[in-house]
């Protein structure tokens, strides 16, 4: 769970960085998208590295979801009778919503891949072979932006607890100070990643990117 | 009575005591004197070594054929179960709690004594021995106490090896503190939770043996009868507290490590479930009960706040190392905010009366003086009945001298506990304390091998009349429990077991059937009385009688009155108690009914013992026996003996057997802490 | 003050249970929560109803017997044990819900009493240092660094009450286990069995039906002894090291 989570943290960080290319305009963005495919050439074939990364991500996803299912089932079995009254003392909202949040992100991920990668659905009906235009068309629709922002909120929550939790599971938070640092890392990643991702849809909707 | 005066002015006994007074006449039957036939002789420092050597061994191959029942899983019981399990015996361990880890040893706070002399402050085995005998007011056995002091050092080694996290100095070596009126630093501690850490150590050692298959643990089981077959203790009848099933467990030997009976006072620092039943059932089967009146009242408890009170909470007396005890000089100041009472209007009475020991005088003196000032009307805190029952324990000086952080480091958990219970912040307002029943030195009579007068019945820890004499020093209960469990019992029980395995008996043996039937009948009786009063109400009333007349100060008239009242209460109990529920399920009222029924009988015996002992010694203060200054006055020439009481039958009088105490290594001295 | 109590009543392990409502008057703020239940039980008995069964013993916060879920929180609203919770934490007219610990590893025995023997079995699996009586070396022959000894002590204060399990949304006993693993692992004496201990205890924990830890932190918040969450990190680290060593 923790290791696959860390893989995703690495992924979303670099993905977010790539998205910000959109701020530099159509050319830079599309060049970046193409560059991802030529990276590693000629040692690797076209899209070679991209597929290696994709396979790594798919494996991580299977591990991550698989572990989540196991944990959820164990949790369910561990408390067959629920409390009639339940009040939480000191846990974060994010920590208690990892399962629902994770599911939200998974559903979003499917749409997101259909939207930009696999089928390339342009909800505005425009062209689909120009990554930059596809993106702008998508985020010019206010409701699409809203869906993406909602997903980013879910991602922020997931990262907020997930980062800390991964470090804790890996046994890296053995002191109170290390624990606070891990918590802080969770906050930073949540804000940076979700915030970074959100800039593009927001700027597109506002017309900064067009 | 022969005695002479030595060069230092001390009275030295030269012949056995002869009792002149007979206050308890008519309440008891005089019996034959007894003596400890296992008592070793020779130079005191060699006695235990020689005795261990002389005790026979049990072949390792035979050990697994020998069954040992141990009742209780506190320090004495848990340590014994672990050690005997390690040795390869077949151990069955019983406790009424849901886990062995919950035994009440866990609540001991202050520390454990050991003659390690790590501080190089003049401590030694001999000094610990001497202090313990003196602290016990010369009412303990010399040989036993010396053995206790001798094995004390092994206990620390053992506990450290188990991972008990004792306090350490910066260099990583063990730290010590001075404790409870002793002038050397020999107390090892784990902040204010030493008992917990020691018990968890013993518990873990025992659980390791459970995993190894040598110990079987029976939790939520209460021993309700001792099985004595053909003159030997051969098992117990226990009730599974969850299913209500009455079970018979047979063995080659039975060890009672069932703790003390302080709950006879209803309010005490004991756990709610602490009871005398295991010991009392054995007493009724013939085991002598020794010195039942010796009760330790602990001076530093949180005062009673009202009628609903179910127990009293002790705070470690280590608090007396830095706290100063006082009350207002004038009664009219008693309800004032203590911080508004100027220094000159405060009476630091312990420092005034005992300038050399001050606030560190022994527990009984600190307790009685607190009672005295409260009886004078100078107590503080809420009115409970006609008195304010509390004195101040003030840390203002310590906070000024050491800083609040240093005080927090030392006593933080105790201060927090105090604030949680009282709602007052002791860093700002002086604590209020009052004495409460804490420990009983009395218990089942045992010989040097810890065997009672019933063959095959061994008794350890607080349940035996032990090594503390008439009073126990602070941090010595943990020492005795672990000494018995780890080092003494395993080396003495083998002498008995060397003759085993004993002829097997089965459940159809008439003595087994009788024991079982008596338990079943008693349970049916409780459930069928169907009267009007709850068990708790009887317990409370008994407690009030005991505290009033058999508490810190006892008098002839009071004790006689108490005996009458207890007899009446007992008769009422058996005709008017109300126990709801069934016998075949978890039934906490039924459990309590059995315990209170036994407390009622014990209470009467305690009063008779206190009435007979017309002297003041340690935890027993008779109003008729005090100096002009109101200090305890012993009468060695009459009472230098152990009072071992034999059950006199239902409705009969108890029989008093005396075991004379002979001192060869130490001279008896009248105690002085001035 | 006057209270309305909603209490779980269940005759035995196999019988169905239900919440029952009781009114209780004359509660004083100086009472502990358990003394308040004592008063209720006296009242119930006088009405011919069986008293509410609940575990309790020392009533000074150290034995770990008491175990009530009060208004949805293990040991109630303060960070302490139920026996040390006082009625001054409540107001006149309050409704208080009292439930047993809920966990598959802690089956209900009766009313509010649960069976926590799973904790004993986890300790049996490895929560000890193997040191037979009499085999110990001189206590000061192995110094233990003071800071490590202090950390060992801090986490050794666990009372085994089970509040961590009761409050954990996953029903995990990781805090309990982590406390023991950290306690023994911080001391030089605990090193020889350090890695087998963690593997064996975790295996037993899982076999008892406790859930997995997702580091939510309710356990540490509910722990009356303030055992911090970093013991779970320590457990994980020791487990990782153990697995790396092929245990």
Image (cartoon, coloured by chain):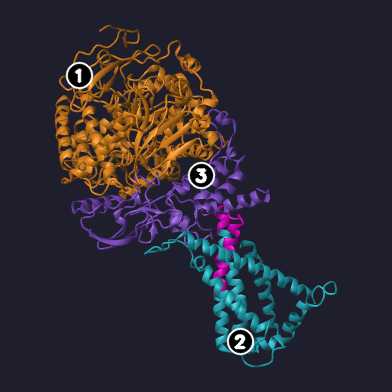
Compared to residue A209, the image places residue A108 above or below, namely above
User: Residue pushed farthest bottom?
Assistant: A125
The percent position of residue B276, horizontal first and vertical second, equals 30, 34
Q: Nearer the viewer, mark 2 or mark 3?
A: 3
Residue sitting at the far right = A42
At x 40%, y 16%, the residue is B38
Q: Residue at x 52, y 51 (%)?
A: C205
Q: Quadrant of residue A87?
A: bottom left
Instruction: Specify the colour of chain B.
Output: orange
Q: In the image, is residue B593 above or below residue C27? A: above
Q: Disc 1 versus disc 2: distance between alpha carbons?
A: 102 Å
Magenta span of residues: A154-179
In 3D space, how far apart are the residues under numbered discs 2 and 3 (Cα atoms)?
A: 57 Å
State whether residue C30 appears in this view: no
- Residue highlighted by disc 1: B29
Locate residue B129, reporting x and y percent: 42, 20
Q: Magenta stretch: dominant SS?
A: helix
Q: Tell me, for residue A139, which label it has, or none.
A: 2
Q: Position of residue C88 (x, y in %)?
A: 29, 55
**Quadrant in which the N terminus of chain B is drawn:** top left
């Amino acid at each position: 769970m923790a290791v696959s989570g860390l893989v995703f943290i690495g992924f979303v960080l670099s993905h977010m960085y790539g998205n910000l290319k959109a701020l530099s305009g159509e050319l830079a963005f599309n060049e970046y998208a193409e560059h991802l495919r030529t990276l590693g050439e000629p040692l690797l074939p076209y899209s070679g590295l991209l597929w290696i990364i994709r396979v790594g991500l798919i494996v991580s996803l299977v591990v991550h979801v698989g572990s989540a299912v196991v944990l959820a089932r164990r949790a369910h079995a561990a408390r067959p009778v629920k409390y009639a009254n339940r009040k939480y003392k000191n846990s974060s909202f994010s920590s208690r919503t990892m399962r629902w949040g994770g599911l939200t992100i998974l559903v979003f991920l499917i749409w997101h891949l259909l939207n930009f990668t696999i089928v390339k659905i342009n909800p505005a009906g425009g062209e689909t072979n120009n990554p930059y235009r596809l993106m702008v068309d998508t985020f010019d629709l206010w409701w699409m932006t809203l869906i993406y922002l909602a997903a980013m909120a879910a991602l922020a929550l997931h990262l907020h607890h997930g980062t800390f939790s991964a470090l804790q599971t890996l046994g890296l938070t053995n002191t109170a100070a290390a624990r606070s640092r891990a918590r802080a890392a969770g906050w930073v990643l949540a804000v940076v990643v979700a915030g970074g991702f959100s800039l593009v849809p927001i700027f597109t909707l506002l017309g900064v990117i067009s | 009575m022969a005695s002479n005066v030595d060069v230092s002015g001390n009275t030295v006994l030269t012949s056995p005591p002869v009792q002149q007074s007979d206050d308890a006449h008519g309440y008891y039957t005089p019996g034959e004197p007894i003596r400890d036939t296992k008592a070793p002789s020779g130079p005191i420092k060699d006695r235990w070594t020689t005795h261990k050597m002389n005790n026979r061994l049990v072949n390792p191959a035979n050990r697994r054929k020998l069954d040992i029942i141990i009742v209780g899983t506190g320090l004495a019981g848990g340590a014994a179960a672990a050690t005997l399990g390690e040795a390869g015996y077949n151990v069955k361990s019983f406790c009424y709690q849901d886990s062995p880890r919950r035994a009440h040893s866990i609540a001991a706070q202050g520390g454990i004594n050991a003659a390690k002399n790590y501080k190089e402050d003049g401590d030694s085995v001999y000094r610990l021995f001497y202090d313990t005998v003196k602290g016990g007011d010369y009412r303990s056995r010399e040989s036993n106490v010396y053995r206790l002091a001798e094995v004390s050092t092994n206990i620390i080694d053992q506990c450290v090896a188990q991972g008990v996290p004792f306090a350490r100095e910066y260099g990583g070596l063990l730290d010590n503190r001075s404790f409870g009126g002793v002038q050397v630093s020999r107390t090892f501690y784990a902040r204010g939770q030493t008992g917990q850490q020691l018990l968890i150590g013993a518990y873990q050692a025992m659980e390791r043996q459970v995993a190894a298959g040598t110990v079987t643990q029976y939790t939520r089981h209460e021993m309700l009868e001792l099985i004595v077959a053909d003159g030997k203790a051969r098992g117990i009848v226990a009730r599974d507290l969850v299913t209500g099933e009455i079970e018979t467990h047979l063995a080659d030997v039975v060890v009672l490590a069932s703790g003390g009976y302080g709950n006879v006072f209803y309010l005490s620092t004991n756990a709610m479930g602490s009871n005398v039943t295991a010991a009392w059932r054995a007493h009724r089967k013939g085991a002598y009960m020794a010195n039942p009146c010796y009760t330790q009242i602990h001076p530093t408890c949180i005062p009673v706040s009202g009628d609903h009170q179910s127990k009293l909470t002790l705070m470690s007396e280590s608090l007396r190392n830095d706290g100063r005890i006082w009350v207002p000089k004038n009664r009219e100041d008693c309800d004032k905010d203590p911080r508004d009472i100027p220094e000159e209007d405060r009476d630091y009475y312990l420092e005034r009366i005992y300038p050399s020991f001050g606030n560190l005088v022994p527990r009984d003196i600190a307790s009685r003086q607190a009672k005295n000032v409260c009886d004078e009307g100078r107590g503080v805190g809420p009115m409970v009945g006609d008195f304010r029952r509390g004195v101040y324990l003030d840390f203002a000086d310590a906070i000024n001298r050491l800083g609040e952080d240093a005080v927090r480091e030392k006593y933080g958990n105790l201060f927090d506990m105090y604030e949680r219970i009282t709602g007052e912040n002791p860093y700002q307002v002086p604590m209020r304390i009052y004495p409460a029943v804490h420990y009983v030195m009395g218990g089942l009579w045992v010989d040097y091998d810890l065997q009672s007068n019933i063959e095959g019945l061994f008794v350890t820890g607080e349940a035996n009349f032990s090594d503390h004499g008439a009073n126990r020093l602070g941090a010595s209960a943990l020492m005795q429990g672990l000494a018995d469990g780890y080092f003494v019992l395993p080396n003495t029980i083998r002498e008995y077991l060397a003759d085993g395995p004993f002829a097997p008996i089965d459940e159809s043996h008439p003595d087994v059937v009788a024991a079982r039937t008596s338990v079943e009948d008693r349970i049916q009786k409780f459930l069928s009385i169907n009267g009007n009063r709850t068990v708790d109400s009887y317990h409370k009333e008994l407690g009030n009688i005991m505290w009033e007349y058999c508490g810190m100060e006892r008098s002839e008239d009071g004790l006689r009155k108490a005996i009458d009242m207890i007899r009446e209460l007992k008769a009422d109990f058996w005709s008017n108690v109300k126990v709801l529920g069934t016998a075949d399920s978890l039934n906490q009222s039924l459990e309590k009914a059995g315990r209170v029924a036994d407390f009622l009988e014990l209470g009467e015996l305690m009063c008779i013992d206190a009435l007979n002992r017309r002297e003041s010694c340690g935890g027993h203060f008779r109003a008729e026996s005090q100096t002009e200054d109101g200090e305890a006055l012993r009468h060695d020439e009459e009472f230098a003996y152990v009072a071992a009481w034999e059950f006199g039958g239902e409705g009969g009088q108890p029989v008093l057997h005396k075991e004379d105490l002979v001192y060869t290594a130490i001279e008896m001295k009248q105690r002085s802490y001035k | 003050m006057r209270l309305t109590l909603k209490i779980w009543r269940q005759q035995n392990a196999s019988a169905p249970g239900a919440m029952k409502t009781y009114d209780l008057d004359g509660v004083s703020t100086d009472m502990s929560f358990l003394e308040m239940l004592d008063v209720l039980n006296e009242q119930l008995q006088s009405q011919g109803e069986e008293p509410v069964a609940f575990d309790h013993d020392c009533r000074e916060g150290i034995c770990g017997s008491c175990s009530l879920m009060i208004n949805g929180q293990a040991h109630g609203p303060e960070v302490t044990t139920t026996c040390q919770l006082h009625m001054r934490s409540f107001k006149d007219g309050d409704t208080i819900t009292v439930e047993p610990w809920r966990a598959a590893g802690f089956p209900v025995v009766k009313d509010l009493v649960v069976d926590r023997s799973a904790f004993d079995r986890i300790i049996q699996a490895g929560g000890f240092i193997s040191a037979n009586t009499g085999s110990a070396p001189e206590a000061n022959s192995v110094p233990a660094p003071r800071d490590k000894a202090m950390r060992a002590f801090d986490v050794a204060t666990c009372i085994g009450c089970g509040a961590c399990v009761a409050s954990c949304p996953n029903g995990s006993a990781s805090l309990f286990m982590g406390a023991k693993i950290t306690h023994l692992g911080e001391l030089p004496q605990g090193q020889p069995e350090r890695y087998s201990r963690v593997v064996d205890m975790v295996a037993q924990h899982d076999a008892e039906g406790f859930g997995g830890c997702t580091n939510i932190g309710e356990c540490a918040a509910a722990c009356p002894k303030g055992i911090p969450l970093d013991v779970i990190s320590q457990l994980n680290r020791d487990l990782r090291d153990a697995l790396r060593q092929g245990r």
